[in-house]
Image (cartoon, grey):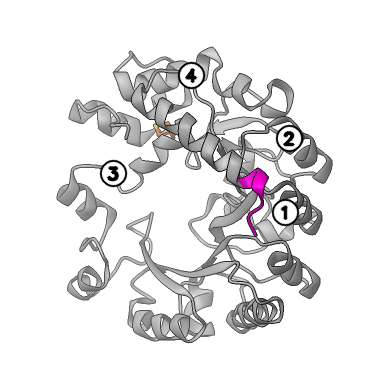
Amino acid sequence: MLNLETLERAADATDRSARSTADPLAPVSPTKVRLEASTFCQLKCPTCETATGELYETVPKGFLRFDHFKAFLDEAEGVTEIELSNFGEVFLNPQLSDILRYAHERGVALHMANGANLNTVRDDVLEAVVKYGLRHIRCSIDGASQETYEQYRRRGNFDTVMANIDKINAFKKQYGSDYPTLTWQFVVFGHNEHEIRKARAMAQERGMDFLLKLNWDENHSPVRDKEMVRREMAHGAASRSEFKEQFGAGYMEHVCHQLWDQPQVNFDGVVWGCCRNNWKPFDANVFEQGLEGAMNSEQLSYARAMLADGAPAREDVPCTTCSLYKAMQRDGRTLQRG
Ligand code: SF4
C-alpha cells in the first residue's frame, strides 16, 4: 500500500535520478539499494560459490540485523526501494518479519527480485510477506519435478517450494493483496530443458510470471537442443557467449549501473557496488558513513569514472579485475548511462 510519504519519496527519487543520469560523473544519491539480508544458504547448487564456500573467502557470513536495518532506514530518508536478496537465501534471516514490518511502516518497498529458493520458511513469515506488502519474489526453480529440480538445487525439495508458493497465494487471497508478485525463474541447463513448457504451465496456473535465464557456467550441463532454447528465450540466444555475439554486450553488463542507481551493500553495511562483485569490497560502509557519504567516496566515484568515462584502471578498484570491465576495455567501449 502506498502512503503519502512513499509518493513524495518517489517524486524526489525521479528528480534525483534524472540528474544523475544526465552526468555520469556527478555525485549520486540512490533511491534504491541492494541490502543483503543473508549470505547463508542451505542448498548445495554445484556451481554456486555460496554453496562451495568460496564466497566466504572474501564475503563475510551473516544476517542483516533488524537494529541495523532500522537505523539505516531512519538515516537514509531518500531510499524508497530495497532489494534484499543476492548471494544467500533471504528467508533464512531470523529477523525477516521485523524487517518487513518496519519497511512497511516507513513506506519503503522491499523486493526479493534476485532470487529465493523458498525451501525453508515458516508460515508466519509467509504471512508477513503478504501482510507487510513485500513487492516481489523471484523464485529460483530450475525444473518441474523433484527429479530434475534437485540435479542443480541440491538438498532442495520441489514439493515444499510449490507448497510455499501456494501458501503465499492463499495469504494474498485472505488479505486481498496483489503483493508479492511472483516470478518463476528457470535457469536453463541440458538436464532440465525438456521441462521448460511444463514449468511454464505450472507457473501460469499459480499466477506467476515465467522467466528463462541463461546458465552462468556454460560448461555445467550445457543446453542440448539449442534451436529449441533459442525459440523459448525472448532474446533468441542459447548461451551467454551467443548473447555477446548477437548484441555486442555482456549478458550481465547491465549490473554495472548499480554503481549509480542501486548499490550492493552487505548485511554489515560494507559496499560491494554491484551484485556481481564478490572478490573485493569498496572501502565504504553505509552504516558508518550514510548512503550518500559512502556512495560518493573517492574510490566509488573513481570506479564510475572508469566505467563511464574511460578513466585509467586503478588497482584498488574492484572493477579493474572484473571480466565485464575487461571485455569493455578490449572492445574499446565505455558504459552508456541512460
Ligand atoms: S565492472 Fe564488474 S565489478 Fe564493476 S560494476 Fe561492473 S560488474 Fe560490477
Label 4 C-beta lies within 8 Å of the nearest ligand 1 atom: no
Residue 256 seen by the camera = yes
Quarter of the image containing the C terminus? top left
Q: Which mark is residue 323?
A: none
Q: Give whichever of discs 1 and 4 has the lower sequence position.
A: 4
Name the residue located 29 percent from the left edge and 69 percent from the top edge.
223
Front: mark 3 or 1: 1
- Which residue extends farthest right? 67
- Amino acid bearing label 2: Phe
**Image spot of residue 139 (x, y percent):** 54, 68
Q: Which residues are magenta?
A: 1-6
Quarter where residue 137 is shown: bottom right
- Please give the residue where the numbered disc 1 appears in the rendered image: 104
Give the vertical position of 132 relative to 296 (above or below). Answer: below
Q: Give whichever of discs 4 and 2 has the lower sequence position.
A: 4
- Please give the residue where the numbered disc 4 appears in the rendered image: 27
Q: Give whichever of discs 1 and 2 has the lower sequence position.
A: 2
Name the residue located 68 percent from the left edge and 49 percent from the top edge.
107
- Amino acid bearing label 4: Pro
- Amino acid bearing label 3: Gly
- Please give the residue where the numbered disc 2 appears in the rendered image: 72
Quarter where residue 286 is shown: top right
Q: CA distance from mark 3 to mark 1?
A: 36 Å
Q: CA distance from mark 3 to mark 4?
A: 26 Å
